[in-house]
Amino acid sequence: MANKLIICGDEQNKAEIDSIQGLEIQIDNGDNNIIQIFEPYNFTNFTIRINGSENKIEIGKNAIISNSTVDMGVSMVRRTVKIGEFCRLTDSILSLPETDDLLTIGNHCVIKQKNHIRCDDGHTIFDIDSGEVINRGGKVILGDNVFVGQHSYIGKNVVISNNVVIMPCSVVTKGVEKSNIMAGGNPAKIVRENISFELLK
Amino acid sequence: MPNKVILTEKDKETVLEGKKLEGLSVSFLENSDNNTVKIISPYYFHSFSIVIAGNNNTIEIGANSHIRSTMIVMTVPSDNRTLVIGKNFDFMGGRLDLTSDNNRGIIGDDCIFSSNITMTTEDGHPIYDIHSKKLLNKGGSFTVGNHVWLGYNTTVCKDVEIASNVIIGACSVVTKSIKEENCIAAGSPAKIVKRNVDFSKLLISSYEKQKNNKEDENKNGK
């Protein structure tokens, strides 16, 4: 099956198109990749790089994405990126190097400049005695209303709950299970509880 | 003696007159003399630039290097700086800075560096004690062993030595030497977080396939 770029007003109203303004799609090799985008959208200099088959990207309505890259440049299959409604993504990189990697970003999320979100480390780290792999990744999940400050790094297997603020220059290596908190630092820790943030128009 | 860019192919050295290799730009600034850039073929460069000011500076890059979006900065006019990079070097992007006279940078074989890496031999500006006027931040070198993986956005500060088979976690700031081999160091400042490990350049799925194949071969051999 061929690669598909689908744009929808809603679930019932789908149309297959060739290109979208502000979005560059580079598919090196592979087929049956599906990119589904809901209207309205606002893209500038947004790149999706795919190598491999059966990868899926879904971007919810009212997304504002600029200078960002979804990087599936390593030849692997069945990776999924889901970005919710009303999300803003600026100058950031989402990397999914391995098979079956899953990256989900909830609704009303803000990812500021120079952020890097990775579902896998990209190379293998193993125990020298047993040869056992110790850096297995697979998924990154961000809940609704998550704000990620600039220059942060979100690593493999991180699950962030709803209403969370990640401070600038943080390195998130473990999940943030609590809601309504602010976390930051290297490695990121909870610095404040019972907070919320509002997305200004 | 003039500045030279030398390319070695099959043990034969050629001095490049036009100073041009694909993906590499070498600039020698004004009044610089007797500087040498040595590159061993094969190489893969993309947006790689080298800027040198001063005299008697040497850069050597080993065979089979992949270097992208990187700057080697020797823009402050100083003399006798050396940067030696081993073979099979894989660099996604960053900046190697050698500031003062006699600075030395050494990177071993089989290293992989991610993007946004900064390595410096000096802070660039002096910090001193206000009473004694003694210089507090003297630098001079950085040394990286063989088979080292620097994660995304890592900074390696002056006078740091990283041993072989070490992994530096993403967004780390290495301010002190990591002298133990086979460990993971991470954080700001970087500390050892795990020991007795090694890494493979392969992705996990390819690594496991290779490992299983080897185990099967061993079984069949027996």
Image (tube, rainbow, N blue to C red):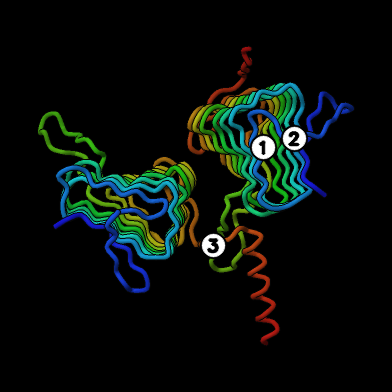
- Looking at the image, can residue A164 be seen? no
In the rendering, at what x and y percent does residue B137 appear?
22, 40
Element type at mark 1: strand
User: Same subunit under labels 2 and 3?
Assistant: no
The amino acid marked with disc number 2 is Glu
Rounded to the nearest angstrom, the CA distance separating label 1 from label 2 is: 19 Å
Element type at mark 2: strand
Observer-nearest residue: A2 or B164? A2
Residue ID for mark 2: A58
Q: Quadrant of residue A126?
A: bottom right
- Looking at the image, can residue B19 be seen? yes
Q: Residues within 10 Å of mark 1 (few under 14, many from 20)?
A: many
Left or right: B42 as drawn, with respect to A148: left
On residue B200, which mark appears? 3
What's the residue at 33%, 67% (across, down)? Answer: B8
What's the residue at 11%, 29% (across, down)? Answer: B131
Left or right: A181 as drawn, with respect to A78: left
Residue furthest to the bottom: B222
Task: Tally the numbered discs.
Answer: 3
On residue A159, which mark appears? 1
User: Same subunit under labels 1 and 3?
Assistant: no
Q: Residues within 10 Å of mark 3 (few under 14, many from 20)?
A: some
In the rendering, at what x and y percent does residue A32 appear?
79, 48
